Image (cartoon, rainbow, N blue to C red):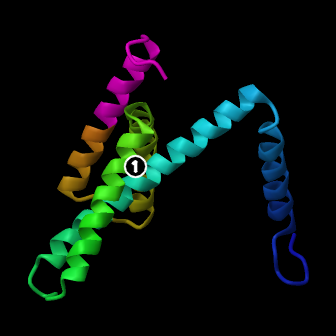
Amino acid sequence: KVNKKQTPVNALLLTQLFTQLFLLSILSPALNETYLAAITIGTTMVLIPYLLSSLYAVKVSFGGRHEKNIYKFIAILGTLYAVYVIYAVGIKYLFLSIIFYAIGAFVFLKGRKEQKQKPKQWEWAFILILIAAAIALTVLILTGKIVI
């Protein structure tokens, strides 16, 4: 069902309902901790692509096509920032991010299948390493060797 502006009404209402529930959950101390943990995990997950992008910017800026040192400075600064924030957030959230990325790998594979494309060999290798790491981390968390 859409309104006169072609906006899906039910999706909009559902989004607003969940937004309000999350905002109300902050009032409870226990739920507030969970909410802050979710935000921290999300932040860590965003920082991994940011780090990879800034590392690529370093590679490009030192590739010889850019004579201006400002590009090198910005790329290095971005990389240092990403490394620092990932370190500051903590290793346990990085571990949780790896588990979520492994779940996302299945979505990636489904998307490739829908597009009738096969993942490249390096993508398969990366996915297998990611899934193995996620399984190992899950076992370590469940056995209490890593405390979250």
Q: Is residue 144 magenta?
A: yes
Quadrant of residue 123 in the image?
bottom left
Residue at 78% in and 52% down: 19
Q: Position of residue 2 (x, y in %)?
A: 86, 74
Most common SS among magenta residues: helix
Question: Is residue 118 among what the camera can see?
Answer: no
Residue at 24% in and 63% down: 55
Q: What amino acid type is highlighted by mark number 1? A: Val
* Rendered view: 4 above or below 53: below
Residue at 26% in and 70% down: 75
Q: Nearer the viewer, residue 4 or 24?
A: 24
Q: Nearer the viewer, residue 143 or 90?
A: 90
Q: Is residue 105 magenta?
A: no
**Which range of residues does the magenta coloring cover?**
131-148
Label 1: element kind: helix
Q: Position of residue 90 (x, y in %)?
A: 41, 35
* Rendered view: 98 above or below 50: above
Packing grade of label 1 (10 A; few <14, some 14-19, many >=20) is: some
Which residue carries the number 1 mark? 85
Q: Position of residue 31 (x, y in %)?
A: 73, 31
Quadrant of residue 4 in the image?
bottom right
Give the quadrant of the N terminus: bottom right
Question: Is residue 144 among what the camera can see?
Answer: yes
